[in-house]
Amino acid sequence: MDSVKNYIQENKDRFIAELIELLKMPSISADAAYSQDVLNTSEAVKDALEKAGCDKVEICETPGYPIVYGEKTIDPALPTVLVYGHYDVQPADPIELWDSDPFEPVIKKTDIHPDGAIFARGACDDKGQMFMHVKALEYMVRNNVLPCNVKFMIEGEEEVGSGSLSWFVKNNHEKLKNDIILISDTGMLANDTPSITTGLRGLSYVEVEVTSANRDLHSGLYGGAVANPINVLTKMIASLHDENNHITIPHFYDKVEELSQAERDEMAKAPFSLEAYKKALDIDAVYGEKGYTTTERASIRPTLDVNGIWGGYTGQGAKTVIPSKAYAKISMRLVPNQDNLEITELFTKHFESIAPAGVRVKVTPHHGGQGYVTPTDTPAYQAAVKACKESFGKEPIPVRSGGSIPIVALFEEELGSKSILLGFGLDSDAIHSPNEHYGIFNFLKGIETIPWFYHYFVNNK
Ligand code: BES
Ligand code: MN
Ligand code: MN
């Protein structure tokens, strides 16, 4: 495995060039206008896996976008690592806030990435991170150091809820059989502070609609006498948090796992600067649930956030109107033991119950999923720790993330497999935002770390 550094040095320009080709493909799963691009991207991933040395690669059709499945079996008696990633990306909008075309990747240096970073939608989430696994496989196959069997499962609907992958996993237990799932779709603390993600939050996502009169009304003739659905909706939303920023939905916290003081103390050891955090976001104060630190609020505590709200007149000038309808999209990030379907139901019941007479309320659930915690006392986790020590020369810190990859809990439920979340992105990489980027250092460090994971997983099991 010691040759990995040399291999990367000799091939890095090609690795970057290949990733750039993949990033040029606008595989936006949320927007049907890009469906052909999403399909083309699945073909490109298939080609990449074949070239990297998989013996068998297939495009598996699903009710939605296909799943690219690849495998390299060296000996059925040896363990199998299943790599999961996604080739779809978030929409690029608001496009005017990008400094360069989201699908014409450019390399630029930044303060955090002095070696340069690739700017493009999907650079970090998740094409850049997924591609590290393809190149790590290439290295292991070409240098005869692949120590076990590998399966790849790369989906095209992660950013829209992994609906087809759920179906695929439920129907392919035997095909997907594995000893550990390895995923790079999360982040780490800083380039000189390696960390391994040990938890993900769950998600319940709903859309609400509040209706008053059967048509928009003149706000002079009817104003004051008929419920204004926007006034009502905003009041209802405001009531969902109390003065301490606790969520007011009855039974919302019933199953929340409270961490012990010892666990919280352990978490607090991870380096974090509140000043730097505020500065990076240009805010003068943080905001959140009373009794918890910023790190805790963004990882081990559940949340309720409005993601979008609309209704009424938003065009030019003024229009005096009481709209008939108002809408909002609301997401709740959940922590382990909170069941997303149960939370969606609690939300729906509560939201309906607080609607005043004079309006009708409709709640429509979107996608969701359970949270996940990776046990750290396993050979697989310890292999990831050793791998980071080899590549970074430092002990990685375990970190519970606030983000969600709902399919990870389903992997455990359906396949009985644990997942190792070995991500190399930084919070500042602007995933889902304009100017998303991924550090060249991070990309290459990932390729270097992954073969070490295989090595220690197989040799220390
Ligand atoms: N890769 C992210 C999740 C992530 C990023 C987890 C950084 C931890 C650290 C994933 O692609 C994502 O965006 N997930 C969505 C949920 C999904 C159901 C759309 C999320 O977290 O909002
Ligand atoms: Mn992702
Ligand atoms: Mn994402």
Image (spheres, grey):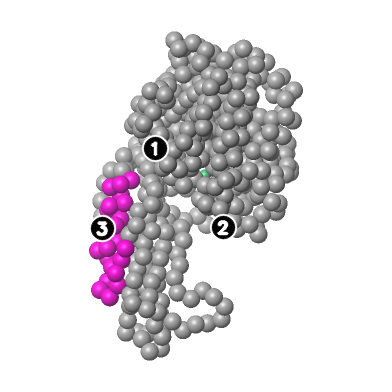
Crowding around mark 3 (Cα neighbors within 10 Å: few <14, some 14 to 19, many 20+) is some
- Ligand 1 under 8 Å from disc 1 Cβ: no
The Cα–Cα distance between marks 3 and 2, rounded to whole angstroms, is 35 Å
Point out the residue furthest to the bottom here: 221
- Which residue is tagged 1? 166
At 44% from the left edge and 10% from the top edge, which residue is drawn? 77
- Ligand 1 under 8 Å from disc 2 Cβ: no
The Cα–Cα distance between marks 3 and 1, rounded to whole angstroms, is 27 Å
- Ligand 1 under 8 Å from disc 3 Cβ: no
Q: Secondary structure at mark 3?
A: helix
Identify the magenta region: 340-362
At 37% from the left edge and 26% from the top edge, which residue is drawn? 173
- Which residue is tagged 3? 349
Query: Was residue 131 drawn as part of the magenta stretch in this picture?
Result: no
Q: Nearer the viewer, residue 367 or 356?
A: 367
Helix, strand or loop for the magenta stretch, by majority: helix
The amino acid type of the residue labelled 2 equals Ile
Q: Earlier in the sequence, mark 3 or mark 2?
A: 2
Q: Which quadrant of the rendered structure holds the C terminus? A: top left
Query: Was residue 356 drawn as part of the magenta stretch in this picture?
Result: yes
Quarter-of-image position of residue 37: top right
Single out the mark in the foreground, 3 or 1.
Answer: 1
**Drawn side of residue 172 relative to residue 143, left or right:** left
In the picture shown, does residue 90 fall above or below 388?
A: below
